[in-house]
Image (cartoon, rainbow, N blue to C red):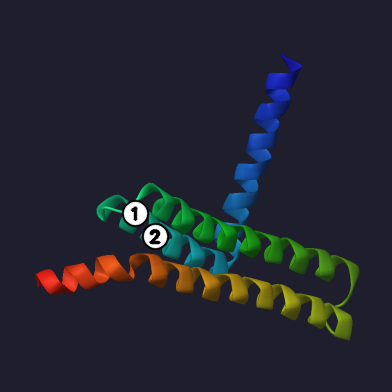
Amino acid sequence: MSFIRGLGDSFSHAWRGLRLAFVSERSFRIQIVAATAVLFVILVLPLKEHERLILILAAGAVLVLELLNSAVERLVDLSKPRLHAFAKDIKDIMAAAVLVASVFSLVIGIIVLWPYIGELFRLL
């Protein structure tokens, strides 16, 4: 019974973290909207299984990095004042990691979806 309760506690903490990130982090909300759009496209278009997996992985990677960015920012705020140069550097580097993942995810999305988008335009 202790294992089940511990597992339940773990999930409870994880859901709390997701809610906290969603409520307090505008960038995370934007990424959730983008990931939802990706899931909608996956459901609507006749994608191959590996194309679906690639899009899900790309969207998931951006969300995970956004959560890590938020956690690192809070940790930096806890350990160093906002005005410290290293604190700013750490935050900027984490933001850059999210940006790079977002750009590459967008490129992946364009590459995977381009043939389907082209076909939709041909039908119109």
What is the secondary structure assignment of the residue under circle 2? helix
The label shown at residue 74 is none
The residue labelled by disc 2 is: 38
> What's the residue at 67%, 73% (across, down)?
97
> What's the residue at 52%, 55% (across, down)?
57
Which amino acid type corresponds to the residue marked 2 in the rendered image? Val
Which amino acid type corresponds to the residue marked 1 in the rendered image? Ile
Percent across and percent down for residue 96 are 67, 78
Q: In which quarter of the image is the C terminus?
A: bottom left
Residue 79 falls left or right of residue 39? right
Name the quadrant containing residue 101.
bottom right
Residue 84 falls left or right of residue 109? right
Percent across and percent down for residue 22 are 55, 58
> How many marks are shown on the rendered structure?
2
> What's the residue at 73%, 20% (across, down)?
3
The label shown at residue 42 is 1
Q: Do the residues labelled 1 and 2 touch (CB within 8 Å)?
A: yes
Is there any visible trace of residue 67 in the rendered image? yes
Percent across and percent down for residue 49 are 38, 47
